[in-house]
Amino acid sequence: MDVVGGRSLYSVFAEFAEQRPDREWLGFERADGEVTRWTYGEFLHSVHRSVNLLTGLGINKGDAFDLHLSNHPASVQLILAASYLGAVAMPTNPISTVDELTYLVGHSESCAVFTDPGCLDVVDQVAEALSVSQVLVCDDGSGVPEGYRGYDLELGEQVAVPNASRVATDGLVQLLYTSGTTARPKGVMLTNSCLIYGAEVFRAATGLRNDDCHLISLPLYHAAAQCHALWPSLVSGCQVALMSRFSASRFFEQAVTYEGTMAALFGAPLRMLLNQPERDTDTRHEIRNITFAQSLTESQYEEWHRRFGAPLQQLWGMTETCSLPIMSPLSGERRLKAMGKPVLGYEVKVVDGLGEETGVGDPGEVIVKGVPGKTLMLGYLKNEEATSETLREYPDGVWLHSGDTVSTDDDGYFYFLDRGKDLIKRAGENISSIEVESVIMDCEGVLDVCVVGVPDAVRDESLVAVVVSANGTTVSAESVVTFCEEKLAHFKVPDRVVFRDVLPRTSVGKVQKQVIREWLSES
């Protein structure tokens, strides 16, 4: 059954706006605390103004533009405008370096950049290097510097009736670049169809309702905030409370203020919330479900439910899957140490190196069946080799190879073991860094940890644990090793423990292991 039904992101939103123009759609809290709210009807008018602004910049069907922004309503307006026009939005991380952004803007052939005032030093250099003449600044409360074009000002000058015709609904609408490690990032091509399909699957798997308010504090330039928050909210017709950024000290206060009932987070923000002092707002909220990825320890889960009482729903997915093919069951045992089970709408299995399905408990690669451009990404931009390596055609259809190593249990739950490239090979043994990290996290005095393999002339790789101590505690390398010796087989015990004040993480909390490996190689 086709659950997309010829719809686009724009047409879904426009239909809701026409049905109930006076219902609140989006509330946005800036970093300075100022709040702006839009009804469905008001926001649709802003989208139409965005359409006219884009066409005035010469952006039409097939043209790409960069959203180099922290969370801002402009991202939502412009992506919906791109959906209307058949243009392509390319969100990027506002902390990107000149080299990183030059590659992304150049590779995507973006012809305009929408950015924050604080990013202009980088954006100006990129625009000059690539001869990008269209740079518009979105006001984040600090104002638009003199000499620059202001997005909000120019948007207000547009009429609220689109001056261009709508295009076919199933085309490319976004490019989201995956994080690179040793290679350049790959541009994941996402269509209206696959984003709506993924949103509908997520809506059903989480019980997202029309009367919900989704609290969004993850960055919109990342697939997580879009695919398990924004677009499911759009297809559900519910409300969105968009925060400029995640704040551990204010998260539950914001949930109370905006009457949030749903939220999307990751393991790192959950740990940050647990590290906050207990407050009255910890339990005064109405959140009935928080989706997240990256497991906590058993003791952290227990403390979470004691303090906050907000149910957690574990999940797994990739930018390339457009949604979350594996999630904790909505009803019944969630079993949060697991990623979850395959959800209705996706077929998932675990295979070995020969492509054969593995047995219960045996590690293998998780792969997902789908239709490119409809239920999975269309492919990687200008990279046929990587596309054919990830989207492989078999007699029974196309399967997306994730590269992630998982196992299953007798009840059909999937358990994350490691990113394929992060499995540590030590003297003939394959070691999951996740397993070792989960043990070290239970060691008294440890706040955060990352385990990596570094080259070893004798044993292929040796294990190094990079540890962040909890505030006010003392933990030594010897105590960490001793703790591991009590919990792990000898070949899994770290050879070395080093300490850092903080671990480098991506905008959604994933530890940047390649950066840590580079640290270690230089020390």
Image: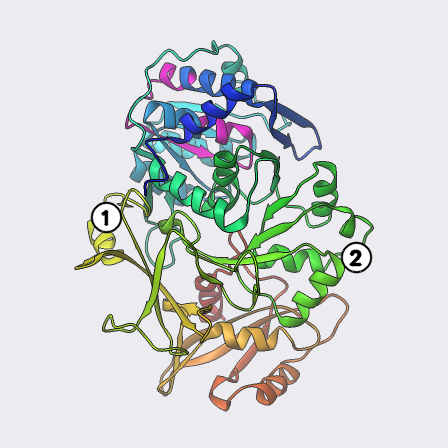
Name the amino acid, label 2.
Answer: Pro
Q: Is residue 99 left or right of residue 152?
A: left
Residue, disc 1: 383
On whether residue 428 falls in the magenta region, the answer is no
Residue 39: horizontal and vertical position, in percent? 60, 22
Residue 176: horizontal and vertical position, in percent? 38, 43
| Nearest the eye: 132 or 493 | 493
Report the residue that reaches farthest toward the right: 280
Q: Is residue 375 left or right of residue 157?
A: left
SS at circle 1 = loop
Instruction: Answer yes or no: is residue 149 visible.
Output: no
Residue, disc 2: 277
Instruction: Indicate the quadrant where residue 27 lies.
Output: top right
User: Magenta segment range?
Assistant: 53-78
Residue at image x 61%, y 19%? 22
Q: Is residue 96 left or right of residue 189?
A: right
Q: Relative to 244, is 51 above or below?
A: above
On whether residue 64 falls in the magenta region, the answer is yes
Q: CA distance from mark 2 to mark 1?
A: 48 Å
